[in-house]
Amino acid sequence: MRTLKGALGFLAILLLLTPAPAYAWWGWLDDLSGPGRFRGPAFDVRLVCFGAESEAKRLVDELKNAQLLTQKVIVERDDPNQRVPVPRADVLAARNAWRQLIADLSSIHLTFPVLDAKRLNEAATRQAARLDARLADSVARTDVPPTVEIKPQEMSEFLSDSVKELEPLIAEVSRGIASINSTGVLLSACSTDRKRRSSIELGVNFWYADGNPGFANSQQIRLTTLMPMFSFRLFTDPRFDVLDAGMGAGVYWFTSKGFDSFSGVVLEPGRLDFHAPTLWATYPLNSPTHILRRIAAAPTFRFSLMEFPAGFSPDAFAGVGEHHVQIPGELIKSWTIFIDLDPFVRRAPFVKSTK
């Protein structure tokens, strides 16, 4: 039991240290050739994600850079409409930063198509026109003075309008990455800086079975499992990524007032997580259809196979009569239902805007 307490203590530390919010879920384990059926809460912690740098990180970094460079050319004056000379190089850097952000946002459909094409094109067109009006291409000329006269009020309005235009789009991308990184677990230590293709988790299940006259002197039987797991996304397109797969192996503990506690090795040779496509988790809550799809993106249904390869001796569960038999190692079906609310509560780490 000292080992079990240590495992539970380790899980508690992980829960405290992991930054994502926690949500519990419930699982069922089919009958053994003996006691059952088991049910109880299940907890998975995603420890590390493997994959490429996410589109969310790139867009958030570019937005931060564009904001900071624009703020650099806003020189405060008593009269905000007074033209102020600023270095042409600074204006050019700000203009190029916004152009790079517009280009990358417009091309996101090639790698992570979660944004509505029409809405994205309209936003990009408006932002390009706004950019031309305030930071025209003429600032790139080399045959003009090294300073440009800028009205601080106009630049402040440009910055505010630009952030208001682009932040919601980038937030949708960030929600999509958060959904990918948190699907199928209670807690995820993965930030939106990386887009998960595969990951390593640690799972703890607290199963219990009601008393059965054939086992444990009719006392309740409890099963605790501690299992490291490897999972991966089978599909990468966020419009169709409805299935994840995984496998794992670990240790179990059976306890009851009706028999001496014992432990051993447990395997999970395969599991499948079924969920709505990532796209549904990105929708803004601006219509009944989008609200329903955001809600539908929260639950995940898991089907897995578990095995106790060594089986159980006739005395393991204090079976009586016909139940006092050797229980062989066998594959046992398991189901789990859980809710992923991370995309609802996680926010993109934007720079504080001037709004």
Image: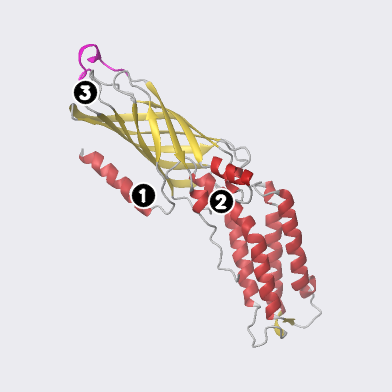
- Residue 102 location, x and y as percent? 70, 60
Q: CA distance from mark 3 to mark 1?
A: 34 Å
Residue type, mark 1 in image = Leu
Which of these two is toward me, 221 or 17? 221
- Residue 108 location, x and y as percent? 67, 51
Give the farthest residue toward the top. 322
Which residue does the numbered mark 1 point to in the structure image? 15
Residue located at (68% from left, 56% from top): 104
- Residue 206 location, x and y as percent? 32, 36
Magenta residues (range): 314-328
Disc 3 packing (10 Å; few <14; some 14–19; many ≥20) = some
Q: Earlier in the sequence, mark 3 or mark 2?
A: 2
Q: Is residue 162 above or below residue 72?
A: above
Q: CA distance from mark 1 to mark 2?
A: 22 Å
Quadrant of image for the C terminus: bottom right
Residue type, mark 3 in image = Ser
**Dividing the picture into quarters, in which one does residue 230 lie?**
top left
- Res 135 visible: no
Q: Is residue 24 above or below residue 308?
A: below
Q: Is residue 192 above or below residue 307?
A: below
Which residue does the numbered mark 3 point to in the structure image? 218
Which residue does the numbered mark 2 point to in the structure image? 175
Disc 2 packing (10 Å; few <14; some 14–19; many ≥20) = many
